[in-house]
Image (cartoon, rainbow, N blue to C red):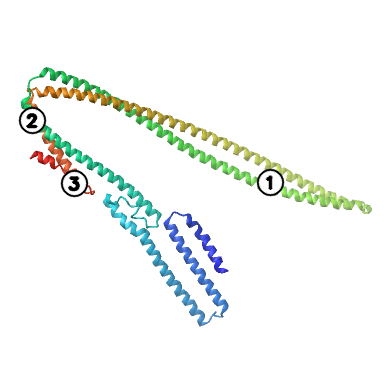
Amino acid sequence: MYLGFLEGKVRNIMKPLLTSKSFILKFCMSLAGVVLLTAGIQGLYLFRILQRENYVGTQSGMVLYVGLLVLDGFMLFCLWGVAWHIYHKNVEQPITLLAPIIRDIDVQHADLAVFFQETQCQEIRLLSQATAHMLTRVKSLVQQLHNADLQILEASKTAFVASKNQSALLVSQVSSSDSMSEAIRELVTVAQHISDDVKAVVDVANQTLRITEQGQNSVMNVIENMEEIQHSSKVSSNRIMALSKQSEHISEVVTTIDRMIEDTKLIAFNATIEAARTQDEGKGFGVVAHEIKLLAEEVFESTEDIKELIRDIQESSHALVLATEEEVKTVSRGAQLAKEAGTSLQQIFDMVQLTTESAQRIAAATQQQKSAREQVLQSVETANQSSSQFSKESQQLAVKAAELNILAEGLGHILSGFGLTPDNGQGVQQADG
């Protein structure tokens, strides 16, 4: 019977832990529950032994008491060992394994879900998931840098080869200044169109930024109105509580009135009896009548109290109605602000659409520029007046390509620290040789 009672108490203590997400709270409360259960069982056992056997004050009783204390100490030591093992396995060991991964940003351990699937600590799992998400993004960034490094190496190689070919072709250029000037004028015109379109894109981007800021302000206003709604709800709750208390008071007054009515009936009954006794000239009836008068006055005073309480309830109800109306107004303002936020988002969409159209115009202008450049290339193939200047520029381009190759190699060394080593620009070095 006592054991079942203790078991029920322990279950009531452990019940909130079933829905708790905190590993530390679960851990501490579980230890406390086990300690309380152990102490209860041993106390029950000691009580039964002492009740059955007269061990009080005897040497056997002291030996039993000391033995129980030693057993308690041993169980606490074992419990401490188990607790330390659980803490080491679920908290300390995962943190020790996770720390170097975070410190070194080791992208090779991006998948930490399996790595920490055995731990029972919810906080450690959340930390591992966040770390895995971070490492995944870092790995993606490093991969993008790796691809960019390869493209830079390829571009430097192409630029280097193109500069050497251009230096070789400059020897065969012939004079065609008129056609080259016309092609250059077309190129300048197209460049001007491109510049105008780029300016339009910048203006649209600025407008988009302003509209976005307006949307953010609208969202902040919505949040503030939600806070006001919460405050209004609290006020309404307080008013309702006040109304409830007043109702309870009314119940007490009504109970008093009922008691007084019962007493009045009893006195009236006694007055009837006394009235029948006319031998004493109605003295008893006079006393009863006086009591009835006093009770009537008390009933009157209670009625006044009831009226006062009713007025208080009406005032509380009125205040509750006002608070509810204010809450409705606040909700309306929040809805209006939400509509404004939606309008701002629609404007952002329109601006993005305008940006797309501007980008399309830039693409068309770039295509025209390509045609103009082809005409310039055809004119340059027959021109020989600027061969010396072009030769110098080709040499400078070769130098820049070599510098670009060096920078790409440096980037490759940096990326190698993350476990990704881009293909070095051996092709450029071979072309240089």
Residue 105 visible, this orientation = no
Q: How many numbered marks have been drawn onto this rendered protein structure?
A: 3
User: Which residue in the protein does label 3 denote?
Assistant: 413
Compared to 93, does 78 lie above or below?
below
Circle 2: residue type: Ser
Q: Quadrant of residue 409?
A: top left
Residue lying at the far top of the rendered structure: 178
- Disc nearer the start of the sequence (2/3): 2
Residue lying at the far left of the rendered structure: 171
User: Which residue in the protein does label 2 denote?
Assistant: 167
- How far apart marks 3 and 1 lie (CA) works out to 85 Å
Q: SS at mark 1?
A: helix
Circle 3: residue type: His
- How far apart marks 2 and 3 lie (CA) works out to 32 Å
Residue 153, percent from left and from top:
17, 39
Residue at the spot x=39%, y=62% of the render?
86
User: Which residue in the protein does label 1 denote?
Assistant: 250
- Disc nearer the start of the sequence (1/2): 2
**Mark 3 or 1, which is nearer the eye?**
3
Picture quarter with the C terminus? top left
Q: SS at mark 2?
A: helix
Picture quarter with the N terminus? bottom right
Residue at the spot x=76%, y=46% of the render?
299
Compared to 44, does 254 lie above or below?
above
Residue 316, percent from left and from top:
62, 40
